[in-house]
Image (cartoon, coloured by chain):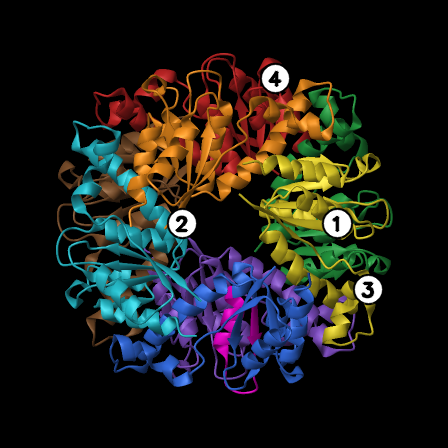
Chain colours: A red, B orange, C cyan, D brown, E blue, F purple, G green, H yellow
Amino acid sequence: MSYTIYLSGEIHSDWREQIKQGILDKQLDIEVLSPITDHDTSDNVGSDILGTEEKNFWKDHKAAKINALRSNSYISRSDIVVIRFGDKYKQWNAAFDAGIATGLGIPTIIMHAPELTHPLKEVDAAALAVTETPQQVVEILEYISQA
Amino acid sequence: MSYTIYLSGEIHSDWREQIKQGILDKQLDIEVLSPITDHDTSDNVGSDILGTEEKNFWKDHKAAKINALRSNSYISRSDIVVIRFGDKYKQWNAAFDAGIATGLGIPTIIMHAPELTHPLKEVDAAALAVTETPQQVVEILEYISQA
Amino acid sequence: MSYTIYLSGEIHSDWREQIKQGILDKQLDIEVLSPITDHDTSDNVGSDILGTEEKNFWKDHKAAKINALRSNSYISRSDIVVIRFGDKYKQWNAAFDAGIATGLGIPTIIMHAPELTHPLKEVDAAALAVTETPQQVVEILEYISQA
Amino acid sequence: MSYTIYLSGEIHSDWREQIKQGILDKQLDIEVLSPITDHDTSDNVGSDILGTEEKNFWKDHKAAKINALRSNSYISRSDIVVIRFGDKYKQWNAAFDAGIATGLGIPTIIMHAPELTHPLKEVDAAALAVTETPQQVVEILEYISQA
Amino acid sequence: MSYTIYLSGEIHSDWREQIKQGILDKQLDIEVLSPITDHDTSDNVGSDILGTEEKNFWKDHKAAKINALRSNSYISRSDIVVIRFGDKYKQWNAAFDAGIATGLGIPTIIMHAPELTHPLKEVDAAALAVTETPQQVVEILEYISQA
Amino acid sequence: MSYTIYLSGEIHSDWREQIKQGILDKQLDIEVLSPITDHDTSDNVGSDILGTEEKNFWKDHKAAKINALRSNSYISRSDIVVIRFGDKYKQWNAAFDAGIATGLGIPTIIMHAPELTHPLKEVDAAALAVTETPQQVVEILEYISQA
Amino acid sequence: MSYTIYLSGEIHSDWREQIKQGILDKQLDIEVLSPITDHDTSDNVGSDILGTEEKNFWKDHKAAKINALRSNSYISRSDIVVIRFGDKYKQWNAAFDAGIATGLGIPTIIMHAPELTHPLKEVDAAALAVTETPQQVVEILEYISQA
Amino acid sequence: MSYTIYLSGEIHSDWREQIKQGILDKQLDIEVLSPITDHDTSDNVGSDILGTEEKNFWKDHKAAKINALRSNSYISRSDIVVIRFGDKYKQWNAAFDAGIATGLGIPTIIMHAPELTHPLKEVDAAALAVTETPQQVVEILEYISQA
């Protein structure tokens, strides 16, 4: 039986493509959902569609809400939310998505390098798997997808 | 009528005390809940009570879960969750708490310096108030507590 | 056994005071919650506490969200939401509160003059009582409060 | 991945058709649900099917409930509820629908002219986007529908 | 620890008084809630407070809704709903209350004479106890109330 | 957009067939679910499959639970539950189903002769339509199914 | 209309195959979900994918969580959970799954030999059918699947 | 702020008394709920109050349901469910309670000897703490109860 997964978090490496390719290679029946990963488009969507703002706060506010239309909808219809933390930037939105999934009772798989273990301990503790690589995520998906 | 609030996030300044003092000064009928804010106690509680671990991952894991017994219980019985982001550390647990509250449908008040607006835009966009100081939080609490 | 009720809607007549007085006169065990009914305070609370805005939209936005901290919290802990529609103004917030209560599964009592029957038909159809006067609301509360 | 949206509110302009045409033009995978927008049919459905009433209140009551069979069902299976407020009539049913969606945790997009900002501030404050034109709604839908 | 129970159903015998007396005699920490059991008051409350109706359907409709303000509120805050079926009348409201409690996930205790076993089989099958006498209900309450 | 409806209640007239035929004639996109309407099969299913019982109570108990596997599953996936009360038998299971739907927040359409108005007032008061004939139910379904 | 069922519990006999074959033979429209039933694969999946652990507790911990990704997802999308208890091993995971289904409000069918009646009384009491053989389960599924 | 905990599982050692004494000694603000722990009373309550049964299955059935009135009510109002597994008996009811708590989203603390790690891995994996002694449970409760 199929799963729907949402890939949240880091947008500066190709981990999403690796997972999608792995799913394709192994012919898994898994639907993959993602946020808009183009940084500029995503940052400017509020002012682009709804008009410019003088204050950055409101520019960001409008963009973040339009993006939430997609991300909240996708998270709430997923069976599993996979969240990757990279080695740069604050990535509070990734931890925020992990919290939303947890609050909704949707299980998470977290992916990050071992160096991030301590600051991510609360996020990891609520996850059903803590991984380091896209390959591990694909292996888990393959395992739980067996007939 | 009274409110219960939970104060999540930064533990290296006295913002919680300022809010508590403000509530006291204004005689507001508000119950204040907080996480364990002693850093060492909180980090070591898992191994202190349940036994040491060789791997830091499991040491952190056990500590984070015991802390979740308190924080999840407190968040879920709060009317409002107030979350402060400071200028240091990764603070993913703060964003994670904001997400949990959002997933549970509990409103949030976020507090941070203006410099953090951009990386916190998703967290701010889901909040009912974005503040910069403990005084503003107290003023909001005073306002919504009027007879 | 006691009830908690929230009095939403029109703020330009003394209907809330009449209901409170009726509850007092009949010694009913009912806790009465209300929004901030001072129009100016309520409109300006966002800019007063969180700073001024050039655009009215954002000034209103910040005020409405702070007011939502109170109203959503009060609605969600009420057994019954009473909503009065007057003969002036658009009062969309009153219909909005009726919708929120309905979406949360909390029963409503609606109060309005007979002339408003047609435009309020959807709101009335979801209510458990449609009244015209504060006295009728008090009589209903007295009836359902019998030992 | 597809979305289901419900178009609530004003029935005296062609905004629904514009949104549907935009979705068609851009080949978006979006299912569009609407209320019965024929005013007379909708007003008389109760007496037409279930028998006439002497009192207008009950005539309206029966019609509103039959319409609720459709609208509540459609709202609850939507990912996003779009609600337009026009410049005429009381439109309490539009604000009521916005409240129901909010109470159910379903995100809203509101559409109205800038003049209505103040009376709609509570409704706007709970929305994920406040728009002025059908084109903006279509652009948002296009944006969140990207592969 | 205390329980709250709601006593639904038959109003023509003194079974509620027997249960209350038993609770008193055994000094159980149990709060007992009941519907309005005066038949005439309950039938006429809609027209008495909200005005007369020519059609019995609407007279009944208004009364039933006001009574629902009490019964739904009481059922939803109960730990256990006790429902007695007597040997007369249709008592569909009793079976309706049993269904509401079941739909809300609140456990039921059913009370009826053995002759009614067959027509009540669906209601009984969803109950956690099927009793014949008030004494049995009191014994169950005493048993589950032990320190 | 399609609806799923469940037809609960009376099993001694052909009202279900009339509704199904009407849906077919009008080519409505509606999925119709029904309980097992063969009285003997339904009464004996517990002992037929799971073994005989000396006591009628347990024979009924086992049958009612197996039937609940179907009816509860069907009710919970329906958009609308239609419940008909006939002029014979106690039909507590029909009122019980109406209560379950109400407790789950699923709207109901009730069908019965006018003579039953008084004893069904609580059930009717919670419904979105009270009808007398299968034709009226079909007309409502046709109305809410318009494009 | 179709059902989705999840087959939990004992993995050392061919009861799942018997149920699947029965469903096939009777051409029932039922989707059958199962856990990974290969004992070794299931026990080692955590260390196989995520790395070895010195302590058995953590090895088991990681495996159990990956298996929960599948089982919790499958249980929550099932209409009925069928759980078989065999005559060997502790099988706490089977009782745990029965509890999860019960906590989520999903009905259960339990299967076990009569000797296990006493220790399984709590699990049986919450079920909608208690069976002894795969054939009985198939007969129940056939019965509730009638047109 | 206080917690309510429910102590489920093994009834043949004094672990509940040790936890209660520890709470008393440390003056923690914790309400402790327990099942009926007298084995004979608990096994016979169904036949004692509701009449004897020839078949053990129904005797057990009636007893288990009356006990569920208490345990389900207590579990659902607890902040934390503590479940101890001893070294004897099947204890499926303990694993069942752990599952119910998990299905309801209530966190668990599990207590058992290390020898039981493997068969309890699914139950442990869903817990927020896995302990071996009542003292550890008390220490955790003390830790999360700090001001």
Where is D143 relative to D64, above or below?
A: above
Residue behind mark 4:
A133
Query: Same subunit under labels 2 and 4?
Result: no
Label 4, residues with CA under 10 Å away: few <14, some 14-19, many ≥20: some
Disc 1 to disc 3, C-alpha distance: 20 Å
Residue H20 showing in the rendered view? yes
Disc 4 to disc 3, C-alpha distance: 55 Å
Query: Same subunit under labels 1 and 2?
Result: no
Kind of residue sitting beneath label 4: Thr
Q: What subunit carries mark 2? A: D
Kind of residue sitting beneath label 3: Asp
Residue behind mark 2:
D76
Q: Position of residue B9 (x, y in %)?
A: 46, 27
Query: Same subunit under labels 4 and 3?
Result: no
Going from N to C along the chain, the mark reached first, 1 or 3, is 1
Residue G146 showing in the rendered view? no
In the drawing, what numbered circle is on residue H17? 1
Magenta segment range? E81-100
Residue ID at (34%, 37%): B25
Q: Position of residue D84 (x, y in %)?
A: 23, 44
Q: In front here: H105 or B129? A: B129
